[in-house]
Amino acid sequence: MATKLIIAIVQDKDSNRLSDIFVDNNIRATKLSTTGGFLQSGNTTFMIGIEEERVDDALALIKDASHARDEFMTPPVNMDVSMEGTTAFPVKVQVGGATVFVLPVDKFTHF
C-alpha cells in the first residue's frame, strides 16, 4: 500500500475547523504553528501521512475548509532619498485558502 505525505498550510482562522474535520473523517494530522513570510501572519501547517487512495478525499476536505478572504494591511513606512517618510496607506490583499504539497513516502511507520 503506497503512502503519501500531505503538507497543508492554512490560515489560523481555518485551522480549528479543519482539525475537527480531520478528526471526523479519521485522518490523523500533526498540527504545527507557522508564520507566513510575506504578511507575517499566523498559519497552521498540517502534516498528514495517508494512504494514496485517500489523498483526493483529504484534498477535498482541505479545499472545503480553507477559505480565501480579502484583508487590509498597512505596509511599513517608506523613506525616500531625502529621508522623509511617506504615508503608508492600507492595501487590500487576499489571504487564506491553502497551499498544499503531496509528496511520495518511502517508508511510513506508526508506533
Image: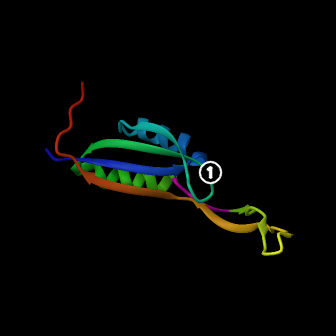
Residue 17, compared with residue 98, is above or below; it is above
Quadrant of image for the C terminus? top left
Q: Nearer the viewer, residue 34 or 9?
A: 34
Q: Relative to residue 17, is residue 86 depicted above or below?
A: below
Residue at horizontal 51 percent and vertical 51 percent from the top: 10
Q: Which residue is mark 1?
A: 41
Please give left or right for residue 5 compared with residue 67 in the image: left
Residue 39 position in % (x across, y down): 63, 57
Mark 1 surroundings: few (<14), some (14-19) or many (≥20) residues within 10 A? few
Residue at image coords 21%, 37%: 108
Q: Is residue 38 left or right of residue 101?
A: right
Which residue is situated farthest in the top direction here? 111
- Residue 110's place in the image compared with 107, above or below, is above
Q: Main secondary structure of the magenta part?
A: strand
Q: How is the image coloured?
A: rainbow
**Number of disc labels:** 1
Q: Residue furthest left?
A: 1
Secondary structure state at the residue bearing disc 1: loop
Inspect the magenta stretch and tell me whether residue 3 lies in it: no
Name the residue type under label 1. Ser
Q: Is residue 22 left or right of residue 42?
A: left
Residue range highlighted in magenta: 66-70
Residue drawn at (48%, 57%) of the image: 98
Q: Please, which residue is most extreme toward the front here?
A: 82
* x 47%, y 51%: residue: 9
